[in-house]
Image (cartoon, rainbow, N blue to C red):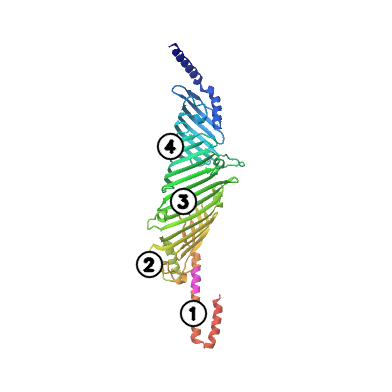
Amino acid sequence: MRLKYLITALLITLTAVGAFWLSDGNRMKEDLALWLGEQSGYQVEIEGNLDWQILGGLGLAAQDVRLIGEEDIRVGSISLSANFGNLFQSLDDWQVKTLQINDAQIASGDSNVQISRLLLTDFRPNTMAPFQGSLSMATGAQGAAYPIQVSGMLRYVPESGTQAGALELLNTRVMTEFLEANCAGRITGGSGYQGPTIAEHPEDLVSIPTLYAADTTAQCDIQKMVLGDRPLPVSELKLSLQGGELEAGLTYPTFYQGDLQIDLDLTPEQGTLAWTIDVKGQGIDSSKVFGSDAGPRSWQAIVEVDASISATGNQLPALVSGAKGTGHVTSQSGYMDVSRVKVIISLLSQLAGKSDPTTDWGQRISYRELDATWTMQGQAHELDTKIDNLRWQMSGPIDLLADRLDLRGHISASAPGADDLIRMDPAFYDIPIPIKCAGTLADPGCATDREELTELVAQLFLNAQKRRLQDVIEDAVKDQLPEPLQDAAKSLLNLFKKD
């Protein structure tokens, strides 16, 4: 019995001594900061108070903690409850009951992550543990912060042999104002940026050294994505970040009746970034993509699209000014709004004194085949669209940043086939009718160039009068001159036809 009392007294004494020692956590701040630095690889500074708890399990609470390394991490407050026996061992042996972080800020290059609250419970290596958090992300000095709610399961897999340690995410729900997704992924330590020093700027889209901070693979099922004020169909995102190179693919298995694939490749290159974006789609209903106006849908067809854009730079002006791109859109049969074409042909007919062939046209007509191509070099764009026997050709600058365009070109119609619906006076076939577009992408403001159109009609009128006069003279020569003189008179008339 006396041994029992002795052990009890010893435990009480140790507890009292421990309570006295740990009651002032500041006695151990430097030792704890040093140990945390060894475990994390950061320089750790505990600038605020440090409080310990030993009853009911070991715990601590710290305020104003800073971790300095490749990122600058500041934590407003952190509280930890863990098993006493493993807390001061390697992270690979930790068993954490609860870990809560409040008001943390992670600055890396030009990006900034703010964590309002992060809670992790029942954490131990090789075991899934639940977590939840509220954070926001921003890029650039003036960049808007995007609030994010995240919750799910995570697992820390310790380093083993040649296999690096990894953090795995499973059944992780990500929610923002514009996005809702379920994700899974794996994060391992990156190689770190080892190139020449890069001068980073607030306008940079991506912090290049950050791309080397970790290697990541992830897959997300996106249930909600809003672009502007328009919800997009369900999609799947696959992402791989390895050695600083980012590859991402966004797949829409049911994109407005068809399917769509968007691929992004982002590669660090000589202190900047090389971008490539590829878009491929088929079976897409154009009327569902572009919506409808108050009247009938302006364009309705099942289309295929194939486009590619490449650019180099890390700021929007450089990307836009140096971008190169091509695109191709095709469809077999469809309906299109021809109200603008009707106005052009009707005006042309009136100016030329011809009958208006558009009086029997509806607001939209059917077509058999559409083939459109687009190319860009910086702000210089060219568009060439063929719809049956109708053709638009436009070129000029499009300033995407200022949302302004100024295109010039023409529209023409060739002699129609049996199934072509665009028909007009034969004098107008293969005549380029001048048009111009000056406005925004949403409202390009396309219309006929009336000055050039008037000159065109005047020239057509003069040509018609000249042909009519030549016909009258030829008839007179045939009827009134003796046959031996007719050949000489026709040769003389041919000299005037060469004008």
Q: CA distance from mark 1 to mark 2?
A: 33 Å
The first of marks 4 and 1 along the sequence is 4
The residue singled out by tag 3 in the image is: 261
Residue 10 lies in the magenta stretch: no
Mark linked to residue 405: none
Q: How many marks?
A: 4
The residue singled out by tag 2 in the image is: 360
The residue singled out by tag 1 in the image is: 471
The residue singled out by tag 4 in the image is: 152
Q: Residue at x 43, y 37 (%)?
A: 152
Question: At which x and y percent is residue 294?
Answer: 37, 56
Judge depth for marks 2 and 4 and give the one in front.
Answer: 4
Q: Residue at x 49, y 44 (%)?
A: 239
Say which element carries label 2: helix
* Residues rendered magenta in the picture: 456-463
- Which quarter of the picture shows residue 132? top left
Say which element carries label 4: strand
Q: CA distance from mark 4 to mark 3?
A: 28 Å
- In contact (CB < 8 Å): disc 1 and disc 2: no
Q: Amino acid at mark 2?
A: Asp
